[in-house]
């Protein structure tokens, strides 16, 4: 189960901030936006109440949490890049949770073994290893599709941050022409 602390760390990383900045009494616009995103994602990805989220986010009142969540809900409706960023953040948290659910199965290790010796290792892979790799591949594909959408959106800042490489790789995987993206 994802915790509010994990949401704080993931959101801070997504915004290039420290987790401490999200819980501190910092009122800079970029920190407040990241904090509100963390409120929203914590509410969606955890079972924590607005009171518990506020407590974890620097002892903020539950009404502050609810107000921040509503702000992000409004932004998601009008800002595709914000919606895609939040979806990618939520997906990344779910991805981490999925990997942990496989317990002792080393999905990455199994994939590396199979990639090095496909004929020999694929036969010996367990059902859990294969299922884990399939789930990871599907999750990564969804994350890549969201990133591609962000790169091709009208927001030049996000496209520049993510780089044109994602769009080019997605086009190559699909066998389509690479679209130009803003830089």
Image (cartoon, rainbow, N blue to C red):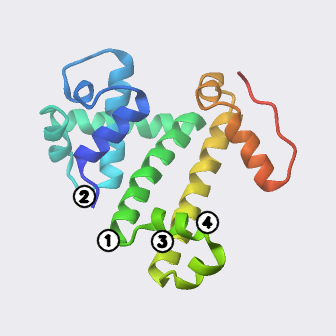
Identify the residue at the far top of this view.
28
The numbered mark, 1 or 2, whose residue comes first in the sequence reads 2
Residue 71 appears in view:
no
Q: Crowdedness of circle 2 by 10 Å Cα count: few (<14), some, many (20+)?
A: some
Between 63 and 105, which is closer to the camera in this rendering?
105
For marks 4 and 3, give the one nearer the viewer: 4
Whether the residues at callouts 2 and 4 have beta carbons within 8 Å, the answer is no
The numbered mark, 4 or 3, whose residue comes first in the sequence reads 4
Q: CA distance from mark 1 to mark 2?
A: 22 Å
Q: CA distance from mark 2 to mark 4?
A: 38 Å
Secondary structure beneath dot 4 equals: helix
Q: Which residue is mark 3?
A: 132
Q: Is residue 54 left or right of residue 83?
A: left
Identity of the residue drawn at 56% across and 56% down: 140
The numbered mark, 3 or 2, whose residue comes first in the sequence reads 2
Q: CA distance from mark 3 to mark 2?
A: 25 Å
Q: Quadrant of the N terminus?
A: bottom left
The numbered mark, 4 or 1, whose residue comes first in the sequence reads 1
Secondary structure beneath dot 2 equals: loop
Q: Crowdedness of circle 1 by 10 Å Cα count: few (<14), some, many (20+)?
A: few
Q: Which residue is mark 2?
A: 47
For marks 3 and 2, give the one nearer the viewer: 3
């Amino acid at each position: 189960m994802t915790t509010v602390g994990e949401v704080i760390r993931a959101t801070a990383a997504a915004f290039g901030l420290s987790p401490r900045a999200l819980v501190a009494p910092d009122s800079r616009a970029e920190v407040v936006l990241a904090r509100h995103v963390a409120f929203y994602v914590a509410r969606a990805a955890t079972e924590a109440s607005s009171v518990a989220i506020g407590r974890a986010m620097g002892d903020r009142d539950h009404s502050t949490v609810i107000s921040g969540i509503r702000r992000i809900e409004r932004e998601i409706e009008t800002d595709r890049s914000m919606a895609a960023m939040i979806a990618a953040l939520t997906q990344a948290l779910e991805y981490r949770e999925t990997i942990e659910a496989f317990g002792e199965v080393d999905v990455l290790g199994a994939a590396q073994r199979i990639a090095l010796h496909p004929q020999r290792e694929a036969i010996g892979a367990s059902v859990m290893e294969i299922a884990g790799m399939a789930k990871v591949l599907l999750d990564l594909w969804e994350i890549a599709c969201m990133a591609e959408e962000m790169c091709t959106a009208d927001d030049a800042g996000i496209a520049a941050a993510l780089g044109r490489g994602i769009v080019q790789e997605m086009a190559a995987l699909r066998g389509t022409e690479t679209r130009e993206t803003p830089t």
